[in-house]
Amino acid sequence: MLARFFSIVMLATPLFLAACDGSGDGPQLAGVSGKVTLDGQPLSDASVEFAPIEVEQVEEGVGGSGGNAATDESGQYTVRTGSQFGLQPGKYLVRIAKTSYDDDGQEMQQIPARYNTESDLEVTIESGGNSSLDFKLESE
């Protein structure tokens, strides 16, 4: 079921991006998508967070937000800011996480801390978008 949802999202994304011409309220968003791999293998069911470092506010309280995504079974993701696809152009800190739980219900991180809690991954989103922003993570 989850795989079907992500497949629909991946197929529908270009249509949504084409429909968003930036003429509505709020900041103009640029499409951002890509693939996450760990040790060369697609990383499924991971969260990808884009936290703003240098993102301009359009007006007081509007703009400057970060975005989030979840990877599908092939490691593909598409970023959303709130209910819209894309990110405002600017500089972002990226955190990638994948958690599981042990038999005692304790949360365990499946990805090295240098990609999430200690991340220094920074990206710049251009006004035209970044249609292939891939992250190649290494466990060692």
Image: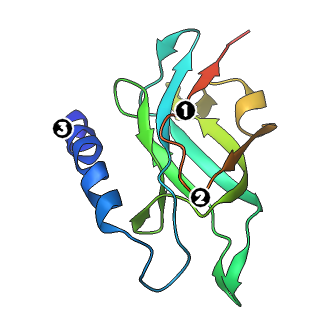
Residue in the picture at 23% in, 43% down:
11
Is residue 99 in view from this perspective?
Answer: yes
Res. 97 image quadrant: top right
Q: Is mark 3 on a helix, strand or loop?
A: helix
Is residue 110 in view from this perspective?
Answer: no
* Residue bearing the label numbered 1: 98
Viewed as shown, does residue 61 lie left or right of 36? right
Q: First in sequence: mark 3 or mark 1?
A: 3
* Amino acid type of the residue tagged 2 in the rendering: Ser
Numbered tag placed on residue 89 in the rendering: none
Viewer-closest of 57 and 77: 57
* Amino acid type of the residue tagged 3 in the rendering: Arg
C-alpha distance separating marks 3 and 1: 20 Å
Q: What element carries label 2?
A: loop
* Amino acid type of the residue tagged 1 in the rendering: Lys
* Residue bearing the label numbered 3: 4
Q: First in sequence: mark 1 or mark 2?
A: 1
